[in-house]
Image (cartoon, rainbow, N blue to C red):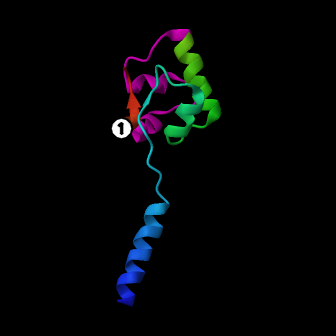
Amino acid sequence: MQIFKSLVFTVLLTLSGFSFAAQVNINTADSEMISAELSGIGKSKAEAIVAYREKHGPFKNADDLARVKGIGQATVDKNRDNILIQ
């Protein structure tokens, strides 16, 4: 019984370290929402995404994010499942 309790505790402790990001529409979200929901994108990169969108128009696909200075393809790939374009 003690082993089972220890195993459950370990699993719960491990899962508590994970954060589950929500999907975010990069064509409508503000910089706070973008930085909160996309991994590896802080406040300044999120502001750069919004500025790029305002200057160049809406993103057509997730890969367009790599055109924003400071955002690489690896960051796009890491967040692909959470990026909406609608």
10 Å crowding of disc 1: few (<14), some (14-19), many (20+): some
* Figure check: 51 above or below 43: above
Instruction: State the image coordinates of residue 24 (x, y, percent, origin top left).
Output: 44, 31
* Residue 77 against residue 85 in the figure, above or below: below
Direction right: furthest residue: 44
Q: What residue do we see at 50% from left, 38% from top? A: 37
For the record, the magenta segment spans 55-79
Q: How many marks?
A: 1
Q: Amino acid at mark 1?
A: Asp
58 over 35 or under it: above or below: above
Q: Is residue 68 magenta?
A: yes
Q: Which residue lies at the image location 43% right of the left edge and 39% below the top edge?
A: 22
Q: Is residue 25 magenta?
A: no
83 vs 70, left or right, is left
User: Where does the C terminus fall, quadrant-wise?
Assistant: top left
What SS does tag 1 mark? helix
Res. 59 image quadrant: top left
Q: Which residue is mark 1?
A: 81
Residue drawn at (46%, 19%), measured in percent from left and top? 27
Main SS, magenta residues: helix
Which is more toward the observer, 45 or 12?
12
Where is residue 47 shown, x and y percent of the image?
61, 25
- Residue 4: x and y in percent read 35, 83
Q: Is residue 69 visible?
A: no
Tell me what residue is drawn at x 43 percent, y 62 percent.
Answer: 15
Measured as percent of width and height from the top left, residue 1 is found at 34, 89
